[in-house]
Image: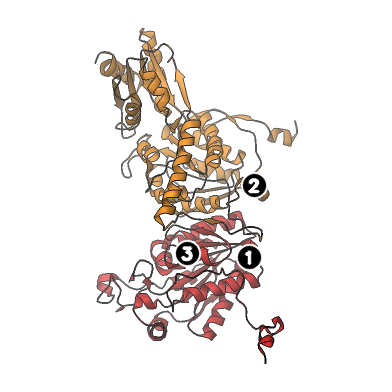
Chain colours: A red, B orange
């Protein structure tokens, strides 16, 4: 095969989606956010929804999501993304509306907005990045931080006595009548990325079919916050996060 | 008269101030109302739910889980270029302050109705004007201003709801209708405005090209956002906002005068208190006292120039409020020490009587 064969468009096997902007990302090397962004961008292109999508960005590391995906965005106050998405979807029912939120945003400060949007069955998709830590502010304890896990505000490891229990909010959301699809995925292997992509696509399709609220949790790494190499962070996630937050569908109506 | 002719006409009705807000919102083409119940303004959402505008104009009405959610739903709707509003009373408005600051930072137009009750804390459901500072000085973080309209009648509850949307979109700011429990609850004759159709999406694209309606291939993405990490970018946003506020201060001041022309003493009061003070002025005139009333209709922008000019003509001013004295600060700033400015007020839900006001005018100003 010659160079000309390789660059022949007929032989193209992969191309970066045009919904992804050509800008350097601020995410740390090894972070899960970049992969999830790419999946979402690919799905928006494949569903031909670029002109009809409104994304709601959180406060947290993904506060800059609007820099990377070439769609209309609203940046929400901390935790309030589901309230914004509720109004956007109700006023523009033929648009694809999704929120992109971390564990602090969705499961601590925004718990009420998350639960009530899901309980009303708003026709939105919630993409939930659970890395068990506040990445943006420097690695503080999150609602999903595991027992024994160290963070800058639980330097000796989280204890029930001092900090309370980790919150499995996805399990809680699956129990609400308003949710139609609740799943937990990850992006640490090629196979996992493919499954996560299928899950997010299903969530987006549900939103367009007015089936109710879909929640896709991505159990993720924060190797910088966890103070590990990207590879070690993946291993640590498999060994420690997956037992507490097992992958798979919690609800699929 | 056929239905469509009826539809295009004003309509005279007897109703509560809160009900007038709901009717006016539907008639002026409001796209979305998001609220949470709280006395003394719950009739606004109750009336909307009763009228079911989603079946007529297509307006969305949603009872949210909290005032925090309501104001953020307003943010989401306003970000789409839609005419969005919420309403609440003092404690609920306190809860909205975060969202109000974000709305200001993101340059989003919207309308908030605050039917004030007595505070601090859970306070009382009786009427008050003690949210003046919170409203015109900025209850949320950062340098921002809200256009503030102070209705003194059920008619103005309707008129100000319509005007608030016009001003909000003219300047891309929040416009607040700052009423008190009396104005919200009392019934009066009101002429409801004619129906205006809601904006189509094409109209929104023209009026608000920044709106997030989905990104056509012909333009860059629209991003509704108040984040500017670079200090110079953040200062630029602030300078733009301040420039807009100076325009508002130049163009949008509204006030009403009563017996001011030959007055030696002027009472300054807004909302319900202004109506009480008008009676006090009539009583003073009957006694031969040359008293007048200046009623600021916009609390922000404040009628500073008008009051400053009056200070060159009259002997003293009395500010009357249902608070410990908040607007009086702005009156004193406008007067700048040239004549005496005194305050009389009642708190905790007590409405002062005309007798009390006249007595205060005599003892604090005329025979001081």
What is the chain identity of the residue bearing mark 3? A
From what the image shows, is residue B250 above or below residue A221? Answer: above
**Can you identify the residue that label 2 sits on?**
B206
Q: Residues within 10 Å of mark 1 (few under 14, many from 20)?
A: many
Say above or below: B96 vs B135. Answer: below
Question: Closer to the camera, A150 or A51?
Answer: A51
Q: How far across and down, in percent of the image, does residue B128 sit?
A: 36, 34
Q: Are marks 3 and 1 on the same chain?
A: yes
**Which residue has dot 3 on it?**
A64
Q: What element carries label 3?
A: helix
* Residue B120 percent across, percent down from the top left: 31, 42
- Outermost residue toward the top in this view: B288
The mark lying in front, picked from 3 and 1, is 3
The answer, for residue A202, to whether it is visible in the render is: no
In the rendered structure, find residue B224 and report the number of the disc placed on it.
none
Q: Is residue A63 visible?
A: yes
- Picture quadrant where residue A229 is located: bottom left
**From what the image shows, is residue B29 above or below residue A118?**
above
Quarter of the figure with residue A228: bottom left
Dividing the picture into quadrants, the one containing residue B300 is: top left
Q: Nearer the viewer, residue B117 or A189?
A: A189
Same chain, labels 2 and 3: no
Give the farthest residue toward the front.
A3
Badge 1 element: helix
Where, quadrant-wise, is the N terminus of chain A in this rendering?
bottom right
Q: In which quarter of the image is the C terminus of chain A?
A: bottom right
Question: In the rendered image, which residue does mark 1 sit on?
Answer: A50
Separation (CA) of disc 2 from disc 3: 27 Å
């Amino acid at each position: 095969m010659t160079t000309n064969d390789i660059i022949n468009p007929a032989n193209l096997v992969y191309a970066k989606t045009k919904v992804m902007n050509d800008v350097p990302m601020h995410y740390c090397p090894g972070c899960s956010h970049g992969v999830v962004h790419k999946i979402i961008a690919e799905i928006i292109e494949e569903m031909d929804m670029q002109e009809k999508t409104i994304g709601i960005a959180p406060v947290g590391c993904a506060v800059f999501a609007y820099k990377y995906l070439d769609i209309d965005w609203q940046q929400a106050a901390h935790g309030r993304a589901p309230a914004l998405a509720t109004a956007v979807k109700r006023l523009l029912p033929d648009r694809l509306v999704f929120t992109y939120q971390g564990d602090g945003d969705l499961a601590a400060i925004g718990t009420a907005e998350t639960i009530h949007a899901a309980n009303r069955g708003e026709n939105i998709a919630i993409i939930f990045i659970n890395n068990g830590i506040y990445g943006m502010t420097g690695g503080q304890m999150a609602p999903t931080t595991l027992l024994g896990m160290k963070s800058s505000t639980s330097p000796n490891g989280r204890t029930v006595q001092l900090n309370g229990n980790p919150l499995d909010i996805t399990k809680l959301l699956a129990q609400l009548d308003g949710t139609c699809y609740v799943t937990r995925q990850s992006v640490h292997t090629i196979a996992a990325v493919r499954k996560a992509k299928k899950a997010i696509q299903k969530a987006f399709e549900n939103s367009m079919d007015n089936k109710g609220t879909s929640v896709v949790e991505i159990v993720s790494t924060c190797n910088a916050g966890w103070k590990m190499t990207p590879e070690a962070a993946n291993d640590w996630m498999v060994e420690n996060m997956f037992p507490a937050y097992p992958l798979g569908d919690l609800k699929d109506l | 008269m056929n239905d469509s002719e009826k539809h295009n006409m004003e309509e005279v009705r007897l109703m509560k101030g809160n009900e007038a807000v709901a009717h006016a919102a539907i008639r002026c083409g409001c796209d979305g109302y998001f609220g949470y119940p709280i006395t003394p303004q719950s009739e606004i959402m109750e009336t909307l739910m009763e009228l079911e505008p989603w079946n007529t104009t297509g307006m969305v009405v949603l009872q949210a889980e909290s005032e925090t959610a309501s104001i953020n739903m307003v943010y989401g709707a306003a970000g789409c270029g839609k005419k969005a509003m919420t309403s609440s009373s003092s404690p609920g408005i306190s809860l909205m302050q975060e969202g109000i600051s974000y709305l200001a930072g993101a340059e989003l137009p919207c309308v908030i109705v605050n039917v004030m009750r007595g505070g601090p804390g859970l306070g009382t459901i009786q009427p008050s004007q003690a949210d003046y500072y919170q409203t015109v000085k900025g209850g949320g973080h950062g340098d921002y201003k809200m256009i503030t309209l102070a209705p003194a009648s059920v008619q103005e509850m309707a008129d100000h709801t319509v005007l608030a949307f016009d001003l909000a979109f003219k300047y891309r700011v929040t416009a607040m209708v700052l009423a008190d429990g009396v104005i919200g609850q009392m019934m009066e004759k009101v002429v409801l405005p004619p129906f205006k159709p809601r904006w189509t999406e094409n109209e929104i694209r023209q009026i608000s090209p920044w709106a997030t309606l989905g990104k056509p291939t012909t333009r860059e993405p629209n991003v509704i956002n108040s984040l500017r990490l670079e200090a110079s970018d953040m200062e630029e946003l602030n300078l733009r906002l301040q420039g807009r506020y100076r325009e508002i201060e130049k163009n949008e001041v509204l006030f009403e005068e009563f017996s001011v022309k030959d007055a030696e003493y002027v009472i300054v009061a807004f909302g319900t208190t202004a109506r009480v003070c008008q009676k006090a002025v009539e009583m003073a005139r009957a006694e031969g006292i040359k008293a007048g009333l200046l009623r600021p209709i916009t609390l922000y922008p404040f009628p500073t120039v008008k009051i400053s000019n009056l200070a060159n003509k009259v002997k003293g001013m009395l500010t009357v409020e249902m608070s410990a004295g908040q607007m009086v600060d702005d009156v004193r700033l406008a007067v700048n020490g040239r004549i005496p400015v005194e305050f009389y007020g009642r708190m905790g839900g007590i409405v002062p009587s005309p007798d009390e006001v006249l007595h205060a005018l005599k003892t604090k100003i005329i025979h001081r």
